Amino acid sequence: MMGSDTASATLRFPAGFRWGAATAAYQIEGAARADGRARSIWDTFSHTPGRVQGGDTGDVATDHYHRVAADITIMAEIGLAAYRFSVAWPRIVPAGSGAVNQAGLDFYSRLVDGLLDRAITPLVTLYHWDLPQPLQDAGGWANRDTAARFAEYAQVVGQTLGDRVPTFTTLNEPWCSAFLGYGTGVHAPGIADNATALAAAHHLNLAHGLGTAALRDALPATGQVSLTLNLQQVRAASQSDADRDAVRHVDAVANRIFLEPVLRGRYPDDLVADLGHITDWSFVQDGDLAAIAAPIDVLGINYYFPTLVAAATAQLRELGATGAKSDPHGTAGPAPFPGTDLAFAVPQDGPYTAMGWRIEPASLTDLLLRVHRDYPGMPLLITENGAAYDDVVAADGSVHDPDRIDYLSGHLAAVHAAITQGADVRGYFLWSLLDNFEWAFGFSKRFGIVHVDFVTQQRRLKDSAIWYRAVIAANGLG
Ligand code: IFM
């Protein structure tokens, strides 16, 4: 199912389906040292030469911190019913533990009030990768104490915003935090060690569990708690037994390492056995799994591209040993899948977005149906989906982005197909509201439906924003 086949279809979503857009603090806020905010691991990383393309940093980003009122007006203009944003931990607890910074809380309180004034429902993510630097200095996510610090921070934010925010997400994409931050090192804090990445994954799971308990304590009885995972829809490069087994393995190290402890209170036996040569799993302590499995109300899923994998043959291992960088896309050739030496990601045919990511909406339908089948009864939200393209501002100030509209309509049709087949998907948050700081790619990749001139900070609705307004108004496509 590609966008062009579905673009003309009329598809209506269930009544009450929640239409939103998403952002994250470090990617848009700027104001890196304002009002008591201290450094996070992304400040350190982006200021380290060679880590981020073009030497870009989030010091100013889209200056959302100072332009929040105007940005809320833009959201209202697009007709958003919901807005997903993240809270910057280093604004709230600058040292990572201890003193709370009231000015940081006040900023998010004003944001929430501004959203509610426009009838836009806030969805708050507590951790979208900006760990306070002092916690990294103590080991970061490789140190289990970080999970307890996260729970303290979650409690503070829950107590402050819980009277107005119906849903909190503990972590965004812990896979990226663990495996890109500590496994491949392409994200902050830039550590490349699979054993450390596996410990980090467990401590992130623990943070989610302890954070969920802290939120339950802080929130009114109606408060909802969720977790957002960037689940991967994995396929085999060939029908060989070895490649099919690589699919099972990658599913374990990318998906089930989070899904199973959170939703079933256990780590998968095959995962533990497969990676016994990398870690002895001694970081999993008595009581951890019960804490991690604290019930959640909704599961967020972020989806962008499918994953193609092959078993690690001697030839591929040789490649890995000679420096093929670990990568979940295999964009530049086969590359070890992050977190493991047993499977490789291999290149896929196009079409691609400007990230080099294959466009395949049908994989989103399959992924949603798989989660629905394996974890029945769990309400789902698409908390991110979108595409980067090389947008240009036309002479008349408009920004024509037909490829993005095609990507989005194809993926919305894919979500609709999953709902039709039984998946309980409650809403869709487009990534992203604004062009922003795309992590290691800096400002070179534009995911927004609103164009941002990074010099003047001027905002312009792209065609996709106008298209999305019509989708929201019609509660569907066509
Ligand atoms: O920009 C990121 C976001 O922060 C997390 N999910 C994927 C997006 C696109 O790479």
Image: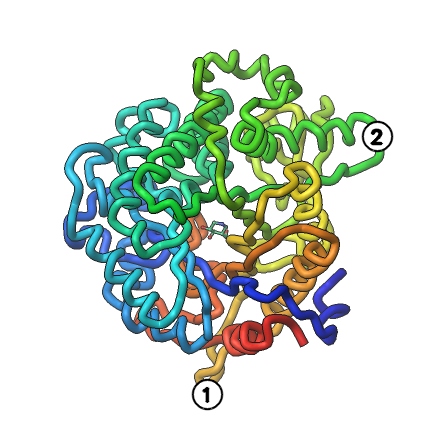
Q: Nearer the viewer, residue 376 or 343?
A: 376
Residue 379 is situated, as x and y percent measured from the top left of the image, at 57, 48
Above or below, 272 against 187 in this view is: above
- Disc 2 designates what residue? 240
Horizontal and vertical percent position of residue 240: 84, 30
Residue corresponding to mark 1: 396
Frontmost residue, 393 versus 207: 207
Q: Earlier in the sequence, mark 2 or mark 1?
A: 2
Examine the image and state in which quarter residue 377 appears. Answer: top right
Q: Give the amino acid at mark 2.
A: Ser
Q: Residue at x 72, y 22 (%)?
A: 314
The residue at label 1 has a CB less than 8 Å from ligand 1: no
| Residue at 42 percent of width and 65 percent of height | 434
Q: What percent of the width, then of the height, locates residue 368? A: 66, 48
Residue 476 lies in what quarter of the image?
bottom right
Name the one closer to the observer, 306 or 292. 292
Q: Residue at x 38, y 38 (%)?
A: 188
Can the viewer see residue 446? no
Q: Residue at x 30, y 31 (%)?
A: 136
How crowded pointer 1 is (Cα within 10 Å; few <14, some 14-19, many 20+) is rated as few
- Number of other residues with Cα within 10 Å of mark 2, as a class: few under 14, some 14 to 19, many 20 or more: few
Element on which disc 1 rests: loop
Marks 2 and 1: CB-CB under 8 Å? no
- Of the residues shown, which amino acid type is indicated by label 1? Asp
Q: Quadrant of residue 247?
A: top right
Q: Residue furthest bottom?
A: 396
